[in-house]
Amino acid sequence: MIISKTRKWGSSLGIVIPKDVVKELKIRENQEVFLDIKPKDNPLKELFGSVKLSKPTEQILKEIRGKESKYI
């Protein structure tokens, strides 16, 4: 898998294949290739819900708020 940025090419978008990949796969000009294109997702969306807390969120917030009031 490679990661590449799209670039404007006239009224279209193009993707540049890095030179080392071209050399490794022996890709030539005008050769057909298969691409599996997926836009990069927001990393926060990928992480959402993956962290499991030992306490409910409400309890954690109450504890934090209780500690803050001691310093006021």
Image (tube, rainbow, N blue to C red):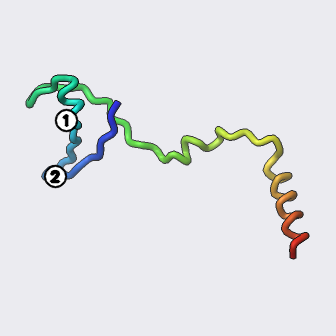
- Nearest to the eye among marks 1 and 2: give it: 1
Secondary structure beneath disc 2?
loop
Work out which quarter of the rendered image holds the C terminus and state it: bottom right
- Residue 31, horizontal then vertical, whole percent: 12, 26
Residues at discs 1 and 2 in contact (Cβ within 8 Å) = no
Q: Read off the residue under disc 1.
A: 19
- Residue 42, horizontal then vertical, whole percent: 48, 47
Q: Along the horizontal axis of the image, is 55 left or right of 21?
A: right
Lower sequence index among marks 1 and 2: 2
Q: Mark 2 is on which residue type?
A: Ser
Q: Residue at x 68, y 40 (%)?
A: 51
- Residue 13, horizontal then vertical, whole percent: 21, 47
**So how many labels did they put on this image?**
2
> 57 or 1, which is in the foreground?
1
State the CA–CA distance, disc 1 to disc 2. Answer: 24 Å
Q: Mark 1 is on which residue type?
A: Lys
Q: Residue at x 51, y 45 (%)?
A: 43
Work out which quarter of the rendered image holds the N terminus and state it: top left
Q: Residue at x 81, y 41 (%)?
A: 54
Q: Along the horizontal axis of the image, is 28 left or right of 51?
A: left
> 19 or 49, which is in the foreground?
19
Quadrant for residue 70, please give it.
bottom right
Which label was assigned to residue 11? 2
Secondary structure beneath disc 1?
helix
